[in-house]
Image (cartoon, rainbow, N blue to C red):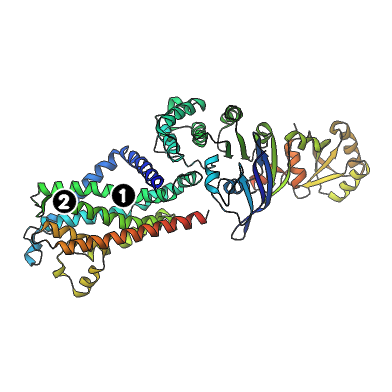
Amino acid sequence: MMRAASHTWWMIMRQTRNLMREPIWIALLLIQPMVWLVLYGQLFKNVTKLGGFGTTSYVTFLAPAIVVMNSFFGATWSGMAMVSDLDRKFVERFLATPASRLSLVLSQIVRSALQAALQALVILVVALALGVRVHTGVAGWAVIVLVGMLVNAAFAGVSQGLALLTRREATMITLANFIGLPLLFLSSTLLATSQMPHWMRVAARLNPVNWGVEAARAVVLPNTDWGSVGLNLVYLLILCVVTAAFATWTFRSYQRSL
Amino acid sequence: MEAIVVEGLEKRYGSVVALDGVSFEVKEGEVFGLLGPNGAGKSTTVRVLVTLTKPDSGNASVQGHSVLSDPAAVRQAIGYVPQDSGVDRYGTGRENLMLQGRVQGLGRRDLRARVDELLELVGIADAADRVVQGYSGGMKRRLDIALGLIHRPRVLFLDEPTTGLDPEARVAMWAEVTRLAEREALTILLTTHYLEEADTLADRLAIVSQGKVVVEGTPSALKAALSGDAVHVELADGRVDDARAALAQIDAPVETVLDDGKVLVSRVLDGGRALPGILSALGAAGIGVSSVAVHRPSLDDVYLHYTGRAFEAEHRGAAVQPMRGRGR
């Protein structure tokens, strides 16, 4: 276990260092979430008049959901790094060493989640500047960052698994697009649940993106129901374990195919 | 003592037979070459030995550890320099080496010293802190080898170490491998499809063809086993049977026919002396000759002799062609 943990750490260090060498990547990583927040915030500004949003400030309603959306989108692409490592035979080189097998998959998921945490903080700071106040304070900030990481890790596990099964960039891109927008619109990210048709409300309840949005939004708005926040966090945690197990299983099937 | 023992390895990928009962042994401290064309099964053999691939049947052991029952011990004992390097192109040479050392379990201080030592040893110390993407092919290959050596393994696997290098870098790499083998007291198993490479580097070699070891021995013994020279006669009119009969009469029997019957190969004691006789015998039988070449025994001939195919042609994967003017 210690070995898996330390190897995961070294693999994360490697990925992070490589990304740090890409100034454009860093810039976009920070700017992208702000664009979502400002763009959607302006576009749907008057939508709160419809009612059911729990606040009259649309940007307050939106900010926690943007954290989740951004984490989710980031996660659907995380498998691309695995495809590239497989392609370049980076993974194979380590399979002929005592490197922990688990670390080769886990490092990708954890790296992706850490990236999401960083972006969550950026979004929260920008939101603060736009006048968003997190009702539950510091605890609320921590919950939002945690939600961002869990949503990301849960979908990163799926993305890593698909990367290991398909090993093709084109397939990965198609899949990311296929699940991305539908899961976004089947959640209360942009609109209050009460504005959705009945069947969408039912579907949203089964949507992990929505679990994240509900939990993150609950700590921002007044009258926080901590029980429901906790339940959504547990759901997300369970999903993380399941998808990480899926990714590990696909890694074994990749090894068998060699 | 045997550093590597390979016993009856078999491996199929779907309907393709990659290994069809490969067996050989490598002694400690030896440089052993697996020579053969692309697709012969060399890389698959290495991949089994470095625990990347599981064979369908057979077994193999490295430093006494079975690749099937104790792969973890094998991974600690070996260094592997894959054909596709697998180096992180967006990291520096030093970062790649540090990561490799970490997962091999080296401690920080020891690792730093070892990285510096290896960077010097393979001659890329000046480029150590540059991103690998900017390295030349030769520099990348040197880094690959350093990565394989980081944990001071006793056995090193080099899969096609010079493929893709220009001739100059290739010769430099040969000197490097020889030097490292001595300095690090290594047992080396290398695969190659370059005859000269096997001839230069290997103490012993096995020729692999279609998933089997066809013959095994020292390069000089393999060459010596072919007594005499090979005479290649290119026929102008393709009358193979007549030519065969004519040559049999003058004690220069045809050993192999190449290039769809256009080229005959005869083995004679002394090619230079036999040539006039061969030409007059063919002339007397009215058989037209378009070219003749005498080959001193080389690994080309060894390959040809044991596989019945010209090495170069098979390597290109094209129709079998004569090896004109390649005598040595």
Q: Nearer the viewer, residue A34 or A202?
A: A202
Nearer to me, A172 or B79:
B79
The residue depicted at 32 percent of the width and 47 percent of the height is: A111
Q: Which residue is mark 1?
A: A112
Task: Classify residue A59 as left or right of residue A152.
Answer: left
- Element carrying mark 2: helix
Above or below B6: residue B28: above
Q: Nearer the viewer, residue A30 or B77?
A: B77
Quadrant assignment, res A204: bottom left
In the image, B229: left or right of B36? Answer: right
Q: Choose the circle earlier in sequence order: 1 or 2.
A: 1
* Residue neighbourhood size for the residue with mark 2, other residues' Cα within 10 Å, grouped as few (<14), some (14–19), many (≥20): many
- Nearer the observer: mark 1 or 2; the answer is 2
Which chain does the residue under circle 2 lie in? A
Query: Percent from the top left, x then y, of residue A257?
Result: 52, 56
Look at 47% across and 42% down and name the residue there.
B86
| Amino acid type at mark 2 | Trp
**Residue B151 image offset from top left, x and y in percent:** 50, 35
Distance between the Cα atoms at labels 1 and 2? 19 Å
Q: Say if A61 sits above or below A138 in the image.
A: below
Could you say where residue A138 lies in the image, as x and y percent from the top left?
Answer: 13, 49
Q: Which residue is mark 2?
A: A141
Tell me: B192 left or right of A176.
right
User: Callout 1: few (<14), some (14-19), or many (20+) C-alpha neighbours within 10 Å?
Assistant: many
Mark 1 belongs to chain:
A
- Describe the element under mark 1 as helix, strand or loop: helix
